[in-house]
Amino acid sequence: MITSVIFIILCIVIIVTAMLTLYFRDLLASVVSYSVMSLVLTVVFLHLDAPDVAIAEAGIGAALTTCIFVIAVRLTRRREE
Amino acid sequence: MKIASFLSLFLIAGFLFVGINRLHPVGQPLGNQNVFIDRTGELTDITYVDTMDDYYLRNGQRETGSNNIVASVVFDYRGFDTMGEASVLFLVVTSISMLLYPSIRLKRDTVDLRDPRTGFPMDMTRIVSNGTYLMFPLILAFGAYLVIHGHLSPGGGFQGGAVMASGTALLIISSYITSHLHRTYNIFSFFESLGLTIFIGLGFAGIGVTFLSNFLANTSPAFFGRVIDLGPNSGYLNSAGLLPFLSLAIGMEVFFGLSIILVSMFHLARKEKDEKGMIK
């Protein structure tokens, strides 16, 4: 019971952070929001007995993509027009 | 534009929710019956095996000698797809290098941000540089563990390579790699190509049966072909035949390829900083 409630809360957090990623005009905030989405998605994958996908999501989604996007934002403009 | 983004988000979410209905129930990959096929290979109920994933789940451990069914699908049953993915990654790294390599080659490669006395970076605080100093070997060791034990536990070449590349990202962010970028780039590029070449070469080694056939599985313990026990167990490192080698090749390619992307982009960022006069 309590685990399924936590699971549903995590799923809602994923959807909300995905929408925030689109919503923010500040691209750095958008990248951070995307990173939070990947991190929560990792927990959800682990809960669904998919540790392979969870490791890939944590390594690529949460760490590497964030790093590359931060460098890209730094090279271009921080505000979206 | 925003509305189009939100619409595509909901469209993708809708497709995923439809796809969820086709999956097995969580925690019950074999439905309600948890029977295994015994060593002689007799199918106890052949009528139950109606889809490919049922076939993989029931026969993967016996046929490939790998305890991780995901690894046996990725590197054995669907090895050709993995080769395609690795080639796509290689192509991505090549095109990014094509855009960014001239700036690396023409750069005067003299600026070193490290303190010559201690060897620590000068433009970062001690917390960042000491934290990197402690964390980087651990991240690298964890990534190597994921690559080497890919056929026994969750993980594999892609995941381990990505974890090790995030260690490179940490190293770049905390300014440990600042000088000799050109040489670093060349070494990384060589090992990336070597990884993909080893993968395709191992594929051709099994050409007697088919391309990428697992000809070493279940042969002799000396060549990673140890016959494993069926059912849940911790397994042996020298099992699964070709899978550990393919995993190592993919891990090498992913690690060095992603590191090349990071080094190139970091180099471009630093060049801009240099042109603005922020580096003395």
Image (cartoon, rainbow, N blue to C red):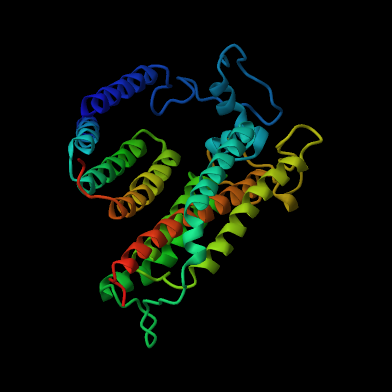
**Nearest the eye: B194 or A4:** B194
Instruction: Provide residue B29's location: percent of width, then percent of height.
Output: 46, 26
Q: Residue at x 55, y 43 (%)?
A: B91
Res B23 quadrant in image: top left
Residue found at the very far right of the displayed protein: B208
Q: Is residue B122 left or right of residue B147?
A: left
Instruction: Provide residue A1's location: percent of width, then percent of height.
Output: 21, 29
- The correct choice, above or below, for B154 with respect to B138 in the image is above
Res B190 quadrant in image: bottom right
Can residue B236 be seen in the rendering of this structure? no
**Nearest the eye: B202 or B54:** B202
Image quarter (top left, top right, bottom left or bottom right) of the C terminus of chain B: bottom left
**Nearest the eye: B18 or B215:** B18
Q: Is residue B234 left or right of residue B132?
A: right
Q: How many marks?
A: 0
**Nearest the eye: B79 or B142:** B79
- The correct choice, above or below, for B244 with respect to B141 in the image is above
Q: Residue at x 56, y 14 (%)?
A: B48
Instruction: Provide residue B37's location: percent of width, then percent of height.
Output: 62, 26
Q: Is residue B29 left or right of residue B79?
A: left
Q: Residue at x 31, y 19 (%)?
A: B14
Res B1 quadrant in image: top left
Q: Residue at x 24, y 30 (%)?
A: A4
Q: Is residue A50 left or right of residue A28?
A: right
Residue found at the very far bottom of the displayed protein: B117
Residue found at the very far top of the displayed protein: B47
